[in-house]
């Protein structure tokens, strides 16, 4: 029995010694100049996240926040021996309401804080996208091509090339009929063969059945802010706003004015990009 109490006493002493050692280390760490500087800088680096804007059945992407992980930053700098801002460990903070996996809402805009514009080109039948793609490449911008079943059947290699070039591909099924079996086939080509993370459906007005079908297939349903077929420079100059998603046809009038439109938007500090970037809430897309 005596041995038992002696052993118990030693264990208790060890536990209390460990506890107070940890306490001492924590106190010392709090008064370390490195820790003090990290905490001061952490407040200036913090970016508050912003929720996606959800109004009934519509959604506009939000924005991730940013925080400094103080303890991880301290561990890295202690090894270095002094404060070094480049060794700060930061991580993005997701807002409570986010567009991620929120497929059951109509996407009606990108985040206006990004000053980005996204062009959707509806590609059907025998449309030739070469001139449009050349304009994008010559101006260092990215577009979105929403394709139907007939066009995909004739241009499957072009679709894969467009994805590789970081343009986004959307799905307009068979004449916008998302109840058609071709919807699933186009989706398979885009996501599984082309390795695009997600795909997109297209509507020019609300339709619950289409929204439900696209949501089941984990596609975002896009409703553009502007739908233009000609005189695009005048229309865009008068009506464009940050975050706009603009639908365009591929025709001679659009092709002729497109370079002028791009130059105008760039002069107004807009970026023209694909939907993947346009709808992203990650900070590096802002």
Image (spheres, rainbow, N blue to C red):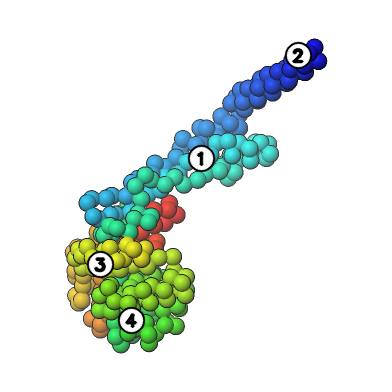
Of the image marks 2 and 3, the number of the one nearer the N terminus: 2
* Residue 178 as seen in the image, left or right of residue 37: left
Packing grade of label 3 (10 A; few <14, some 14-19, many >=20) is some
> What is the CA distance from the residue labelled 4 to the residue labelled 2?
82 Å
Residue 187 image offset from top left, x and y in percent: 38, 72
Packing grade of label 4 (10 A; few <14, some 14-19, many >=20) is many
Q: Quadrant of residue 103?
A: bottom left
Label 3 SS: helix
Choose between 71 and 258: the one closer to the eye.
Answer: 71
Packing grade of label 1 (10 A; few <14, some 14-19, many >=20) is many
> What is the CA distance from the residue labelled 2 to the residue labelled 1?
47 Å
Residue tagged by mark 3? 210
Between tags 3 and 1, which lies in front?
A: 3
> What is the CA distance from the residue labelled 2 to the residue labelled 3?
75 Å
Residue 220 image offset from top left, x and y in percent: 33, 63
- Give me the residue at 31% from left, 66% from top: 214
Label 4 SS: helix
Q: Are marks 3 and 1 in contact (CB under 8 Å)?
A: no
Q: Quadrant of residue 130?
A: bottom left
Between tags 4 and 2, which lies in front?
A: 2
Of the image marks 3 and 1, the number of the one nearer the N terminus: 1
Checking the image for residue 149, the label placed there is: 4
Label 1 SS: strand
Checking the image for residue 5, the label placed there is: 2
Of the image marks 4 and 2, the number of the one nearer the N terminus: 2
- Give me the residue at 44% from left, 45% from top: 93
Choose between 165 and 186: the one closer to the eye.
Answer: 186
Residue 41 image offset from top left, x and y in percent: 51, 36
Residue tagged by mark 1? 68
Choose between 254 and 264: the one closer to the eye.
Answer: 254
């Amino acid at each position: 029995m005596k041995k038992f109490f002696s052993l118990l006493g030693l264990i208790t002493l060890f536990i209390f010694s460990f506890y107070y050692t940890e306490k001492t280390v924590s106190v010392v760490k709090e008064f370390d100049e490195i820790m003090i500087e990290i905490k001061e800088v952490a407040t200036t680096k913090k970016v508050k996240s912003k929720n996606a804007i959800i109004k009934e059945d519509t959604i506009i992407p939000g924005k991730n926040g940013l925080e400094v992980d103080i303890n991880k930053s301290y561990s890295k700098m202690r090894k270095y021996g002094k404060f070094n801002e480049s060794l700060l460990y930061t991580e993005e903070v997701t807002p409570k309401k986010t567009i991620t996996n929120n497929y059951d809402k109509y996407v009606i805009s990108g985040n206006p804080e990004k000053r980005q514009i996204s062009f959707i080109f509806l590609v059907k039948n025998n449309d030739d996208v070469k001139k449009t793609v050349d304009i994008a490449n010559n101006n260092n911008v990215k577009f979105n091509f929403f394709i139907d079943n007939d066009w995909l059947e004739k241009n499957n290699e072009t679709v894969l090339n467009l994805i590789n070039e970081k343009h986004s591909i959307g799905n307009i099924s068979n004449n916008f009929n998302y109840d058609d079996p071709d919807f699933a086939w186009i989706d398979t080509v885009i996501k599984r063969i082309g390795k695009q993370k997600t795909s997109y459906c297209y509507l020019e007005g609300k339709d619950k059945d289409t929204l439900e079908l696209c949501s089941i297939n984990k596609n975002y349903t896009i409703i553009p802010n502007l739908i233009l077929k000609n005189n695009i420079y005048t229309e865009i100059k008068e009506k464009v706003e940050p975050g706009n998603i603009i639908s365009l046809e591929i025709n001679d009038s659009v092709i002729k004015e497109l370079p002028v439109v791009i130059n105008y938007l760039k002069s107004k500090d807009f970026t023209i990009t694909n939907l993947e970037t346009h709808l992203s809430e990650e900070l590096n897309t802002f």
